[in-house]
Image (cartoon, rainbow, N blue to C red):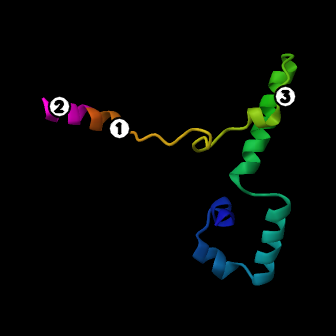
Amino acid sequence: MRLALRLGRTLSELRHSLSASEAMMWMEFDRVSPLGDERGDIRNAQIVKAVFGAQGMNVALKDAMLCWGEDEDKPEVDPFAALEDALSLAAMS
């Protein structure tokens, strides 16, 4: 799927145009040098680290990485809890 996205083709187009051996070579290349967004995020974090380093700050690479998604440390909070409380209070009065 990532290869199709990177090449701007559909999975059906890749299935018809790639031989099995070429697909295996792409899979091995992806294992060695990933084509995904993670690679771009790491590259951008290296640039951020270099910019901060030029200003005299020492930043760890993991601190310069973008965090996509929710933090696992935070407990899951119901976004509608306050609304439900307000509606239940309004219903009681």
Q: Position of residue 34 (x, y in %)?
A: 78, 58
Q: Is residue 20 above or below residue 66?
A: below
Which sits earlier in the primary sequence, circle 1 or circle 2?
1
Vertical placement of residue 36 versus 56, above or below: below
Camera-near label (1 vs 3) is: 1
Q: Determine contact: label 1, label 3, CB under 8 Å.
A: no
> What are the residue bounds of the magenta stretch?
86-93
Q: Is residue 12 left or right of residue 87?
A: right
Query: Where's residue 61, x and y in %?
Result: 81, 35
**Is residue 57 or residue 88 the one in the foreground?**
88
Q: Quadrant of the N terminus?
A: bottom right
- For numbered disc 1, what is the local secondary structure? helix
Which amino acid is tagged 2? Ala
Tell me the residue that label 3 is attached to.
50
Residue, x 82% and y 31% (percent of image)?
A: 60
Residue placed most toward the observer, 88 or 4: 88
Query: Is 10 colored magenta in this rendering?
Result: no
Q: Which is nearer the N-term, disc 1 or disc 3?
A: 3
The residue beneath circle 2 is 90
Q: Is residue 41 left or right of residue 85?
A: right
Q: Main secondary structure of the magenta part?
A: helix
Q: Position of residue 14 (x, y in %)?
A: 65, 75
Q: Give residue 81's mark.
A: 1
